[in-house]
Image (cartoon, grey):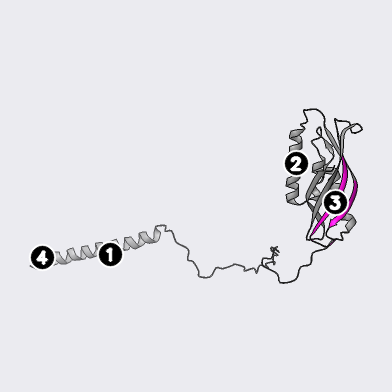
Amino acid sequence: MQLLTRRRIALFLIILGLLFLIIGAYFLIKQLWPQTRTPAVSDQPRDVQIVERQVEPQTYALQTTLQGTSTAPQVLEQRSFSEQDVLLKAEAVVSRMGSGTSQDGFLGYLDVLIDGTPAFRSDIENQRKQMMEQYPASGPLFGITTITASKALSQGKIGDDKLTVKVLSVRYEDAGDRTKPIVSYNQESLVTLLKQTDGSYLVSQVMTKKMD
């Protein structure tokens, strides 16, 4: 009985010794084995310099177009336009649109566009097309020349919205040589002019008829 008890005590002591040996070996290996350590992160970074940056003000180009209706009175520059100016303009329109040749496409009609309203310019371009169709450049030479004889204000006065100027002229037709007209006749032209916002006048209509 005592022998069995001694064996049990000896076995217990052996197991206990082995256990301590294993534990000691574990801690020894843990100390010797290389480990990867994670560096501690501090809440506040060290050796960091804080530099205050000076921000320069920037200038932006803004759109200057203003939308809306202004209640301030607007004054348009009024041009000085005399009766003589109106008479000369009416005379020039009759003379220029009545002169040209089939060879140049009756360019006289184009010369008066600058002095007319949009409706007048459209009408003049149509008249020029009709002349070019009637007297094509590929056909026999045909020319016209209009020489004004007199001009007078027949309706209205300077400052009115509408004026009418009567222009008397002589029209010559030739076969390409202006010095040798083949036909000539007197004609009367009524030139209507409308007042524009700047005080000037533009031609709106020219009505011409042959005189007996």
Mark sitting earlier along the chain (4/2)? 4
Observer-side mark, 2 or 3, equals 3
Q: CA distance from mark 4 to mark 2?
A: 146 Å
Q: Which residues are magenta?
A: 149-171
- What secondary structure prevails in the magenta region? strand
Mark sitting earlier along the chain (1/4)? 4
User: Residue 142, located in which quarter of the rendered image?
Assistant: top right
- The amino acid sitting under disc 2 is Gln
User: In what quadrant of the picture does the N terminus appear?
Assistant: bottom left
- The amino acid sitting under disc 1 is Phe
- The amino acid sitting under disc 3 is Lys
Residue closest to the eye, 61 or 125: 125
Secondary structure found at label 4: helix
Residue closest to the eye, 73 or 45: 73
Which residue is the site of mark 4?
4
Is the residue 41 above or below the residue 170 in the image? below
User: In what quadrant of the picture does the C terminus appear?
Assistant: top right
Observer-side mark, 3 or 4, equals 3
Is the residue 14 above or below the residue 205 in the image? below
Q: Residue at x 18, y 65 (%)?
A: 12
49 lies left or right of 77: left
What crowding class fits label 4: few (fewer than 14 Cα within 10 Å), some (14-19), or many (20 or more)? few
Q: Residue furthest bottom?
A: 71
132 lies left or right of 147: left
Secondary structure found at label 3: strand
Observer-side mark, 2 or 1, equals 2
